[in-house]
Amino acid sequence: MTRRNPRFRLSVGRVRQLLWLALTLAGGWPLAAPADAYFDALKEEANAVQVDPLTREPVAGQAPSPAGAAPTADATEGKGMPAGLTQAEFEDFLQKKYFGSFSFYRKLPRQKKDAVFQAYSQRPDIRFIREQIKQTYLNQ
């Protein structure tokens, strides 16, 4: 009769735990490198922006732009939104550039969306528009 060492006894539960551990470790390592590279790139971009300590706004003309890119509305107007958009263009712009605000805007009924668009037509300032969306959404 052979005697087994109790330390090397593998139960089904132990095998499952070891398999889960091996798959977790093997699956996690390839994902860590791209995430680190992404966060490093974000950190690098954020550190390159100079901020006015009083207003906490980027210093005009100091924000880096990607090589060969045209200046954005933020850099050219200081307000963050181009003026004179149609309502469809306005909604598309919100969706692409300010998705958080757009997610609340799209939940508004058509009449309230029209009111926000009219506010944009009078004052194309993203802070003002965000405030309009917030107030309109909260006061439904």
Image (spheres, rainbow, N blue to C red):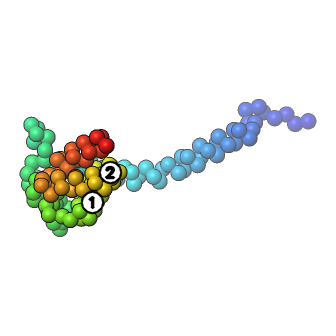
Judge from the rendering whether residue 33 lies leftward or rightward of residue 76; answer left or right: right
Q: Quadrant of the C terminus?
A: top left
Q: In the rendered structure, which amino acid carries the disc numbered 1? A: Glu
Q: Is residue 63 visible?
A: no
State how many labels appear: 2
The foreground one among 111 and 65 is 111
Image quarter of residue 136: top left
- Relative vertical location of residue 21 with respect to residue 77 in this rendering, above or below: above
Gap between marks 1 and 2, in whole Å? Answer: 12 Å
Q: Residue furthest bottom?
A: 68
Image quarter of residue 65: bottom left
Residue occupied by mark 1: 91
Where residue 79 sits in the image (x, y, percent)?
13, 53
Q: Residue at x 87, y 36 (%)?
A: 2
Checking the image for residue 108, the label placed there is: 2
Q: Residue furthest front?
A: 111
Q: Residue at x 17, y 52 (%)?
A: 119
Kindly state the secondary structure of the residue where label 2 is placed: loop
Where residue 56 sits in the image (x, y, percent)?
14, 40
